[in-house]
Amino acid sequence: MKRILLVRTSAIGDVVFATPFAHALRRSVPEAYIAWLVEAGIEGLLQADPAIDEVIAWPKREWAVLWRERRLAALARAKRGFRAMLHARRFDTAIDLQGLLKSASLAMLSGASRRIGLGSREGSRLLMTRSVERGGAIERISSEYLHLAQALSLDAADFVPRLEVGDAADAQARTLLGTRSLVPGRFAVFAPFTTRPQKHWFEDAWRELAVLVRTQLGLAPVLLGGPADRQAGARLAEPGAAVDLTGQTTLAQAAAVIRHAALVIGVDTGLTHMGIALNRPTIALFGSTRPYLETCRMNARVIWLGLPCSPCRRTPTCNGAFTCMRDITPARVLDEVRRVLAAPA
């Protein structure tokens, strides 16, 4: 393997979980050219990673707009141009870390003669030259990517998610923090938002926790999230409960804010996982999704009640009660916070 394309286009948390695979490749094939293909908008998370030579942004949304508007000729031209760009890089190996038809199609589009897929489904196995079944201990963070690294005989030592923050993103984050009178190391990031309601903790619980974090730990609660979370962020921030940075950062800037935080608390969402990757004291709240219980870091812990109905994933059976999250109390979270703050990094 001399020129390698990694394909893991989304989602943010899954991209974070896959980062140690790039480092395993770099240790195993130090002379290789390693590129990562990811959805446009996420590329900022990877651009400062020393294990990756190039981050290629897939313009998925632009293609979707052309499709919706039935501008099929323009879509065909865009795909041909993207294909030509990939072929110009002469990849000999494409590794599909996502295992879906869309990711396998992109691996195929690269022109790589060797295409390796992880847990290939949706017919994507037909586009691979080799498919590796998913495996590994589901309790461990990044376990499926560790399993693939071992299956490919890569150097899988120290296989823990990691992120690097670039100088520009760090400077921008410091400026943003300064405008809100936030001092590095004196605030706690809250990551309350995600795509499914059954993964959310309750707003009253976040407000109660914000009071505890401010009064008992002396840390200013700071809300992070995307543009779609602004309305919810405004509700949580009132009245003066937290500093609301929801929708005000790029992903790279959010990572920089997290790197300067004393603490990260969040639900099963990409920003929470970024706390672990950046080696910040982190508490992750899980309910409807199966958690990684082993974070591989002393200063990161998972709260999961393990109810009989959990994980329900996308098919809750509780009629909206979401007991798996409701029964996690702010007091319990604060107890775990004290443990991670006392733990070595």
Image: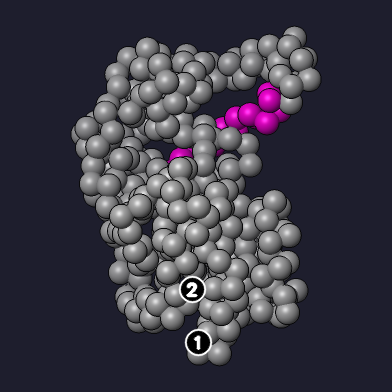
Image coords of residue 6 (percent x, y): 43, 31
Left or right relative to 114: residue 77: right
Residue located 53% across and 82% down the image: 213
Left or right relative to 8: residue 39: right
Q: Is residue 86 above or below residue 25?
A: above
Q: Could you tell me if residue 123 is visible in this image?
A: yes
Q: Are marks 1 and 2 in contact (CB under 8 Å)?
A: yes
Image quadrant occupied by the N terminus: top left
10 Å crowding of disc 2: few (<14), some (14-19), many (20+): many
Report helix, strand or loop for mark 1. Answer: helix
Q: Is residue 55 magenta?
A: yes
| Disc number placed over residue 270 in the picture, else none | none
Q: Considering depth in this image, is 34 or 184 the residue closer to the camera?
A: 184
Image quadrant occupied by the C terminus: bottom left
> CA separation, marks 1 and 2?
10 Å
* Residue marked by disc 1: 217
Q: Considering depth in this image, is 185 or 51 the residue closer to the camera?
A: 185
10 Å crowding of disc 1: few (<14), some (14-19), many (20+): some
Q: Amino acid at mark 2?
A: Leu
Q: Residue lying farthest front?
A: 319
Part of the protein shown in magenta: 49-64
Q: Amino acid at mark 1?
A: Leu
